[in-house]
Amino acid sequence: MPQYLKLQPRGEALMFEDDNLTLSESRGILRHIAHKYARQGNPDLIGTGALERASIEQWLQTEAQSFDVPSAEMVYSLDFLPPSMRQQDGNGDGDGRDVAVVNASSKRVTAGAPAEGNMAAGGNRLQKEEEMRKLFEKSKRELEKLLDIYEQRLEEAAYLAGDKFTIANLSHLPNADRLASDPRSRRMFEARKNVSRWWNDISKRESWEYVRSLQRPPPAAANNNQKQQQHAPSADEQRGNNYQHQQGQQYGAKVDVKSN
């Protein structure tokens, strides 16, 4: 809206005002809130000494530079991929050919359309799903390399920046929550003992469970079925809406720092 663009000319999804201060980057917002309001919340979030803060900053930068992009790409690609995507074709040569993707695309061909149109539509969908599968696999490989590093680090400490929960852990929550809750990507966390223990710890914090509860559709949504049927979104529109919702959850959750 115009009044928002006056504050954020680029129209980004995140904006924070505190008196005369305006911030538009999620980790900068975390740093500011955790520091300014440390006595009203959790003083450990930002660290209580130079060494603690240096460690927090190191792992916060690791999340920003190495975790955020591949995890966000995986979250995005999962919305385009079918629920089952690990079945290979019968030759067993491990070429990555995905039977579930092919079948899912075939079933979504529009009924009643001309045969040529069906083939084109099915081909486009299959091409998109194949593109998303490759993105998923590429991002998964990148993220697994990083999680191997996390596994070693978490052998030495309870959390990434030490033995206290900090914003370095908090910043991982949104994307990791989506991946750990999806059976197609959950194994990355479960297969690593220390990462699994770390994730179970931070994801079950009362403050994060509260943030997750805020993402539930309002009760009134259940009574709007008729309106939704009047303008039902296409599959691609729905996937786009889901992705926008996930990004809103990601940025909104990162601002919640009232941890116990």
Image (cartoon, rainbow, N blue to C red):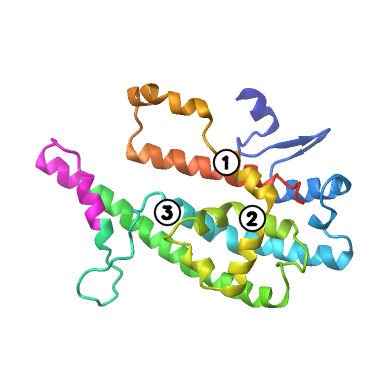
Q: Earlier in the sequence, mark 2 or mark 3?
A: 3
Question: Closest to the observer: 11 or 154?
Answer: 154
Q: Position of residue 40 (x, y in %)?
A: 86, 44
Disc 1 and disc 2: Cα gap in Å? 21 Å
Residue 200 falls in image quadrant: bottom right
Is there a contact, CB below 8 Å, between mark 1 and mark 3? no
Is there a contact, CB below 8 Å, between mark 2 and mark 3? no
Q: Name the quadrant of the N terminus.
A: top right
In reply to whether residue 109 is colored magenta, the answer given is yes
Q: Is residue 221 left or right of residue 46?
A: left
Amino acid type for the residue under numbered disc 3: Ser
Q: Is residue 231 left or right of residue 66?
A: left
Is there a contact, CB below 8 Å, between mark 1 and mark 2? no
Which residue position is annotated with label 3? 77
Decide: few, some or many residues near mark 2? Use Cα within 10 Å; few <14, some 14-19, many ≥20: few
Q: Position of residue 81 (x, y in %)?
A: 36, 53
Question: Closest to the observer: 252 or 122?
Answer: 252
Which residue position is annotated with label 2? 204
Q: Nearer the viewer, mark 2 or mark 3?
A: 2
Residue 55 falls in image quadrant: bottom right
Question: Closest to the observer: 151 or 136?
Answer: 151
Amino acid type for the residue under numbered disc 2: Lys
Q: Is residue 162 left or right of residue 108?
A: right
Instruction: State the extent of the magenta-drawn residues as a range.
Output: 102-121
User: Up-down: is 12 above or below 127?
Assistant: above
Residue for point 19% across, 39% down: 110
Amino acid type for the residue under numbered disc 1: Gly
Which residue position is annotated with label 1? 248
Decide: few, some or many residues near mark 1? Use Cα within 10 Å; few <14, some 14-19, many ≥20: some
Q: Position of residue 146 (x, y in %)?
A: 58, 70
Q: Is residue 112 left or right of residue 174?
A: left
